[in-house]
Image (tube, rainbow, N blue to C red):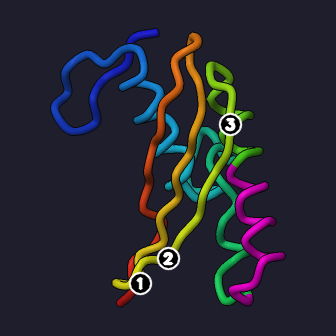
Amino acid sequence: MIGMDAITGKPLTGIAHVRQSIRRIVQTHLGSRLQRRHYGADLFNFISSPGNAATRLKLIAALAGAILKWEPRVKISHILFDINAAGRAIVSVFCSYKGEIFETDAQLIEAA
């Protein structure tokens, strides 16, 4: 499948296209796309949730479900979720595409 790089506008294929697709899925809120209301990850439910292991597990499950639904070309190995010292929530998705394993990072939120 050939796509377009969101920054340069140039053609994008292979793992680079899959990485961009995963980032878009993770960073798109459900209901925000007019023609695809069910596209994206349902992360708004986690705002103001306790920062405990149960919430982390639910968040990772929501991310995995969205990625598997909207990016069927990949097989997910695991997902890591972390909030760094600067307050940025980062998700790292480890998956394989055509037998090649890769990692994709996406920033979810940034502290004000």
Residue span colored magenta: 50-63
Judge whether residue 33 can be spotted in this image.
no
Q: Nearer the viewer, residue 27 or 81?
A: 81
Label 2 is placed on what type of residue? Ile
Upstream in sequence: badge 1 or badge 3: 3
Prevailing secondary structure of the magenta residues: helix
Percent from the top left, x then y, of residue 74? 63, 24
At a point 72% along the width and 34% down the height, the residue shown is 68
SS at mark 2 in the image:
strand
- Determine the CA span between mark 2 and mark 3: 21 Å
At a point 44% along the width and 50% down the height, the residue shown is 105
Task: Give the residue furthest to the left.
Answer: 8
Answer yes or no: do the residues labelled 2 and 3 have beta carbons within 8 Å?
no
Percent from the top left, x then y, of residue 48? 67, 89
- Determine the CA span between mark 1 and mark 3: 26 Å
Answer yes or no: do the residues labelled 2 and 1 have beta carbons within 8 Å?
yes
SS at mark 3 in the image:
strand
Q: Dot 1, crowdedness within 10 Å: few (<14), some or many (≥20)?
A: few
Mark 2 lies on residue? 83
Task: Return the mark for residue 87.
Answer: 1
Label 1 is placed on what type of residue? Gly
Q: Dot 3, crowdedness within 10 Å: few (<14), some or many (≥20)?
A: few
Label 3 is placed on what type of residue? Ser
At a point 39% along the width and 11% down the height, the residue shown is 2
